[in-house]
Image: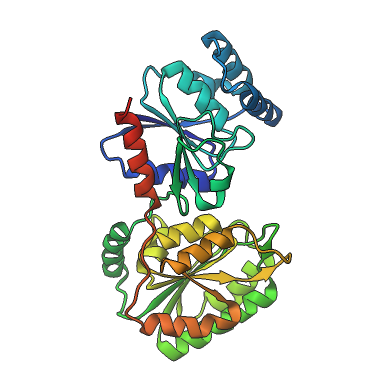
Amino acid sequence: MKVVVLSDRKPGHYKQSLGIVDKIPECQAVWLEIQFQRKWRDNLLRVFMCVFGGASLPIFLIHTLLRWSLIPASYHALVQLQTADIILSTGSSVAAVNLLLGRILGAKTVTCRRPSPVGTRYFDLAILPMISWHQASRKDNICRTIGVPNPISPHLLDVKREQLKEELHLSDCPRIGVLLGGIDRHETITIDDAEWLSEICEATAERMNVQIFVTTSRRTPSDVTEHLIATVKDTDWCLFFITPDTSSELADPYQAILALSDLLIVTADSFSMVCEAASSGRSVAVLTLSHKGVRPPKRYEVYRYMEENSIVNRCRLDELETHIINSLISDVSNKPLEDTETAVEAIRRLVVIP
């Protein structure tokens, strides 16, 4: 099976596609980076495919559209392809290119998430998380997952854990990974949240002799990151404090945190990070911080479903210390999310069934 993966260079989208191809060991994956000459050309191509995506387009017109919209390097990389079984993409900007390339090569087209404004109706397969199920205009081309595919799995992390414990000469003690997101239109993390969180981490570390890892994201407010660096980073109990710009001797410090942790605390603003944590097989606490509005976002419905099915637990900041203690002394673990396996099985069926 030959899979052409179209990448828009966004890490979250890259991880979804990577998770899928990693779990198809028999596939030959070709990664192509797609860049547009101008953002407005990207937008116009999307609108064109939204209107004419179901029409039979002549090949010369498809080439004209791609040549007009893409930088020369991206266009030439596409036209050099001779065959493909699957065109896979994640994200809105590469969705139209996916459909057009599928026409040229006679390949099946697969999208992760719902691309805007193209939608999912013209794709052979759309892998949709629960948060987007209601947006499907067709039902026969939908693979329903709870969260989003990703490259995380319990087996991968267990192997990595043993390697890291030996390399880093770690003692036997409980370990907690704190995965911090940042700001979106529904919620944020404030200085007050950061101060409270650092106090909880310190109290828990002293009370239960735990090591704590912290990672922030590019969306984490700079004042929050600076506060945590000042109060947490150089403590005896904080083994790693990783920011997006931190250099590290570890090849993948984020994966190292997932592997070494017995409990993962992840802020609720980042749906992709929650899904990665939930795929780890570790105990997971989805942490609710400061809301900007009255109505919670739709992802909270998915978190509630995950909690009802023992995949994650949810807690507020004022419940966190108690939750940490209960999680570390409990023998009950969360069930891992298996969305990537679900997506891979749907793709295999797509290739086998004419």
Instruction: Count the numbered circles shown.
Output: 0
* Vertical placement of residue 241 versus 99, above or below: below
* Residue 134 shown left or right of residue 290 in the figure: left
Residue drawn at x 53%, y 40% as measured from the top left? 9
Relative to residue 143, is residue 186 depicted above or below? below
At 52% from the left and 10% from the top, the residue drawn is: 59
Place of residue 338 in the rendered image (x, y in percent of width and height, measured from the top left):
37, 54
Residue projecting furthest to the right: 293
**For this rendering, which residue is in front, 300 or 37?**
300
What residue lies at 54% left-to-right and 26% top-to-bottom? 97
User: Which residue extends farthest front?
Assistant: 139
Question: What x and y, as percent, mark residue 78?
Answer: 47, 21
Occupied quadrant, residue 311: bottom left
> Relative to 252, does residue 99 appear above or below in the rendering?
above
Residue 297 picture location, percent across and down = 64, 59
Q: Quadrant of the C terminus?
A: top left
